[in-house]
Image (cartoon, rainbow, N blue to C red):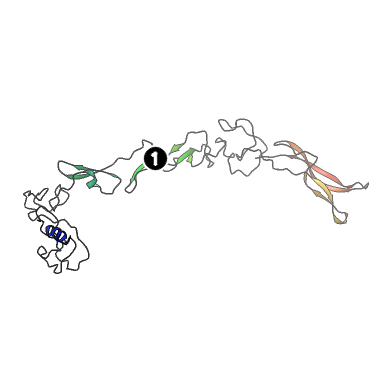
Amino acid sequence: MRKLLLTVIVTALALPACGSSIKSTGDANDDAAGDAGGDANLDMTPEDGADDPVGDMVPEIPPNCGDGDVDDDEECDDGNETSGDGCENDCTWTCEGASECDDSDACTDDACDTSSHTCSHETITCSDSDDCTVDGCDSSTGCTFTSLPDWYLDGDDDGYGSPLAESVCAETAPTGYVDNDDDCCDAYPIVRPNQTAYFVEPYSCPGGTTTHPTHDYNCDGVEERRYTVAGYCDTGMGGACSVHEGWAGDSIPGCGSTGDWLVSCAMDSGGGGCLPSAGRSQIQTCR
């Protein structure tokens, strides 16, 4: 068994170096720069010493590379040291397939011309055929399609757009357009979502979301009455008579309707207690 092992080692050391582009500098006979103690790693850098812990696997440049003649140990030889022109400065092809041309840019189409062995990086075209997106490209992720904002016609110039008119997309608002479609009647500027005032008369909106007469001036879908409390008289401490103003009677008038509004109370001289003494006509307003 010991004799067989010795034979294998001797055979491995005796292998010829012909045809190999990697040279072992662990052998004192092959190491020109003096790995004096022998380096167990394959090493192409002559300045590495005997105790170099790293095995360098750097391809050896053929000795006649650059002379313009293609030798047996060369893939090509164009006689110059320019890289990327089809023949590299180590006399190997620049590329033999598209994978060797990857430039890590998702916005280019990488290809290899197998006749010239050169790489090409054509910028890709990003288009989704949508006029409402901005087409672009991110080098790390590829094509991007950013939606443009929608704008809505504001016919009455109250800051609120119509949900019935067709919207347009653009980077900035066109003249007469706003960024919302919250108006319920784009014909009257007093009808809008932020309306705080109350009105006696209803409105009808031509071409609006509400066509029948309504008091919904703030576009919340509800006719909100302004006056909703009932009035009453009260006898407080010490027998004083006081009034709590509000609608007289049991019902609260609807929008635009008139009712009696209690404004004062007085003690009944006949001993009937604190009773209504005066009122006025009041119109119910709404929004």
Horizontal arrangement in the rendering, residue 107 relative to residue 182 (left or right): left
* Residue 45 position by quadrant: bottom left
| Mark 1, secondary structure of its residue | strand
- Tell me which residue sits at (87%, 56%) in the image: 238
Q: Nearer the viewer, residue 75 or 67?
A: 75
- Tell me which residue sits at (46%, 40%) in the image: 150
Relative to 166, does residue 16 appear above or below in the rendering? below
Q: Amino acid at mark 1?
A: Thr
Where residue 85 appears, x then y in whole percent?
A: 15, 48
Q: Residues within 10 Å of mark 1 (few under 14, many from 20)?
A: some
Residue farthest to the right, as pictured: 270
- Tell me which residue sits at (80%, 43%) in the image: 279
Where residue 128 appears, x then y in whole percent?
A: 36, 37
Q: Nearer the viewer, residue 197 or 85?
A: 85
Q: Nearer the viewer, residue 153 or 104?
A: 104
Q: Which residue, given by chain and number where applicable, does mark 1 sit on?
A: 133
Where residue 136 appears, x then y in whole percent?
A: 34, 44
Horizontal arrangement in the rendering, residue 262 relative to residue 108 (left or right): right
Please state, as top left, top right, bottom left or bottom right, where the N terminus lies in the image.
bottom left
* Residue 231 position by quadrant: top right
Across the whole image, how many numbered discs are drawn on residues? 1
Where residue 88 appears, x then y in whole percent?
A: 15, 51
Q: Nearer the viewer, residue 148 or 158?
A: 148
Please state, as top left, top right, bottom left or bottom right, where the C terminus lies in the image.
top right
- Tell me which residue sits at (40%, 38%) in the image: 132
Horizontal arrangement in the rendering, residue 264 relative to residue 183 (left or right): right
Horizontal arrangement in the rendering, residue 194 relative to residue 146 (left or right): right
